Amino acid sequence: MTTAKFKVNRFWSIVLTFIVVYALIKWGIPAASRSITALPFPLSVPGTLMFIYMMLTLVALFLLVTFSDEYMAEFLGPVKKFLAGGYGKIPRLLVLVAVPLIAGWQVYELTVPKVELPSSLRIQHPSSNFPKTFEALKNPFANPTTDEVQAFLEQAEANEVSFIPQVQADIDAWMDMTEPEHVLSFIPTKPMQKFLDQLDAGSVDDEIAKSALIEKHLFEGRALYAMNCRPCHGDSVAGDGPMADGFKLRPINFTDNGTIETIVEGYTFWRVTNGGPGLPVEATPWDSAMPEWKLNLTEEERWKIILAEYDLAQKTPRIPETH
Amino acid sequence: MRFGGLKHSTATRHRLSGVVQFVVMSILVFCWVLILPSTVFAAAQPTKPKPAATPELIEEGKVIYFKRCSFCHGLLGDGNGPAADFLDPRPRDFTLGTFKFRTTQSGELPTDEDLFRTVSRGLTGTAMQAFDSDLFKNGLTEEQRWAVIYYIKTFVPEFEDPDFDPYQYLIEVPDPGSMPAVNDESVAKGREVFEKAKCWECHGELGRGDGQEAFDRTDDWGFPIRIRNVTHPWKIKAGDEVKDIYTRFTTGINGTPMPSFIEGVPEAKDRWYLATFIKSLQHKLTTHSVLKAKLVEGDLPDSPEDEIWRSAEPMDIRLTGQVVAAPRWQNPSIELATLRAVYNENDIALMIHWDDPFKDVTHNGDAEFNPADISKVGAFNSYVNPNDTVPRQLETFRDSIALQFAVKPLEGTKRPHFLRGDSSNPVHLWIWKSDLSEQNGRAVEEANARGWKQAHKVQDEEQHQVSSNAVWDKGRWSVLMKRPLTTEDRNDVQFNKGQFIPVAVNAWDGSNGEHDMVMSLSTWHYIFLEAPTPISVYIYTLLAVLVTGALGFWLVRKAQAENTFG
């Protein structure tokens, strides 16, 4: 019989499965986490979660074993034979001595006071105190009104566009040096260049003007991000800024799929506004270095930063559910 | 009965092979997962030949530069972007054509590959981060990096001039495989080179950057030189490997007083030895966050240089700039403090040391800056400008360190906020001040804080119970602080055995302009005083052994009985 060659005894296949699952959780997931998060350290599976996974595996294997009497008998056969001394008395004695010792060791390990902090599971996106008023908030700079677009168009036509003060000096220096025809031409992105072409030709499409205005907001948002957020969240919004290494709770990596993509803009705004101190207990606010930005940044500045943050991370916020 | 006999139906056999398949697949996945991390952190070398610098590619580079680089380096490449004023070192002004990290002779331009390396892996410890898309999902691809490099080169007219072509001034970087490894012998030889080439004149005897007595050197851009502490690998800008260090000696760092040693140390092998010596100085960080205090018999030490500290477990605490609340500070000088603790029946002694190249022991309160203007909503920036807002010079501000403890014992995981606690969770601060220490007075001020929004409250003089002793030697402060384990004061931390006692560090380097909230800080770590093992542990253990043993015995009896009768 050809299949006989590959036959693995059911007893051992069960034991082996259990070991492989354990190894995957214990070493496989932390190893995989490094390549997924690109962080320089592995994220290990917390003990409680490990326990749950192993219990589930045990239950699944139990179901498999008790699926039929035949299977059960085949699984228990070697066990019974071993206990009856069918595989020799010395191995049996060794196991009978080793098992109680291992049990004792485990109980000792569990009960002895340890110099090791109990790990606490932290909820990254707590919403227990997320005010409903924030839920439906929309980023005003992502979708400017017709009036705003019109005002911008008038500014652009007069070649007198106003910027936030933080970027003004750099633009002025650039103007002095390059003496451009239009102040906005320092923005080399396609929507802006198209807008400038149309402006030159004397007829500007509303949609083009709108996307050019968003480009200007993005530019200001990126500058504010670089000044305020980059020290921790990093140039590449990967949570790895030059200040990040000193914090136990690392700054969030926005390029991760589980972060700003899974939340509505209003939530992001609320987090930026109230920072660590605004978090509920389940999110360990005492470990969060996130500032309460409402103390230093205006609402406009916070929204512009959020616009740039999503753009830098190449993510879009979740759409709020309509009730 | 034979196991795996012929009685199986085909259905069960299929199920069985399913299990086997699952096991084999799991092992394969597991192995694949294990090798992944090593491939993620690839070398910062191009994998393909570099593309031609076409106008289209340069145009693409311009857009990337605008989006990713201009906020520090400026629209004109002059290092004057909106974020630049708040950074030290400042972003590079490309227009001057002076580039620090090259594989070309001192004073020459960098090769394209040098720029590629810098853009790909960044300059550790500065705001110039890695831009390699293998490291970050939205980093730059190899082609994008070339595009932006070609655009950056348009800021530097010298790149057009064949006389300055960097490829004629290349310096050979040996293959590490053909050079001596880091071992006692190469390190000892490197130490000799270190002595002979007088590296210590600037970098200090132990490499802590403490060789100079004043900031009397500036770089080409007019900023005072802060000499690198080479023992902190996370501050070594262009790579901390032997090969990188070798390249720095050999090429020098353009624009700074760091010269090329290609003539001073002519033999490549000697420079390699020197690099292995520097590599051997690099500190290896401990990773635990709970410090086990050591129980000692008899008196506790009075000096931070006492022999007993050698046998006490160290815990490294990483510090970073105070960026949580205005005034924010992203140019901290102290990024590591190491804590040790010993205790006896009555007292506890904590010893903390950190590197600081200058001993600043005076304090001029009038020079402190008023943060009100930059702390308002809508202020230009809530970060401190290191070149303008605070005086970063000698003899102005004191060096200082504060140990911060939670006043209340831990309940679950709840703690005060790591920055000075919060309204319902006060912290206890032990603030050691170098100027007071120098005057031989009581150098540790005890204070309480409930959040950073209000200044901390200094306790009454008679409640000050922490004594201290400090030494500054070869670019390192070592400070011992001692106190009874418990006190009567309910605003004080109490060191009870068997409890995790949260501790955090605030640190100030006076000559870096640091005072008040312009400081380095850490998040929570813990001190633990071991309690004797309770007797119940042994009882439970014994019970477990007996019950399991009895169960095994019973099973054997049962199996044997079945065997006999079956």
Image (cartoon, coloured by chain):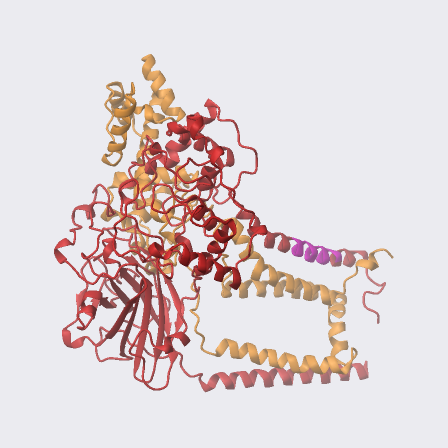
Chain colours: A orange, B red
Q: Is residue A251 above or below residue B51?
A: below
Residue B472 placement (x, y as % from top left)? 28, 66
Which of B53/B542 is in front? Answer: B53
Q: Is residue A261 above or below residue B514?
A: above
Q: What is the quadrant of residue B254 in the picture?
A: top left
The stretch in magenta equals: B17-28
Q: Is residue B555 above or below residue B127?
A: below
Q: Quadrant of the N terminus of chain B?
A: bottom right
Residue B134 placement (x, y as % from top left)? 51, 43
Q: Is residue B137 visible?
A: yes
* Main secondary structure type of the part rendered in magenta: helix
Q: Is residue A142 visible?
A: no
Which of A266/B98 is in front? Answer: B98
Q: What is the quadrant of residue B470 in the picture?
A: bottom left
Instruction: Answer with left or right where residue A247 lies relative to residue B381.
Output: right
Which of B471/A90 is in front? Answer: B471
| Residue furthest out toward the top | A201
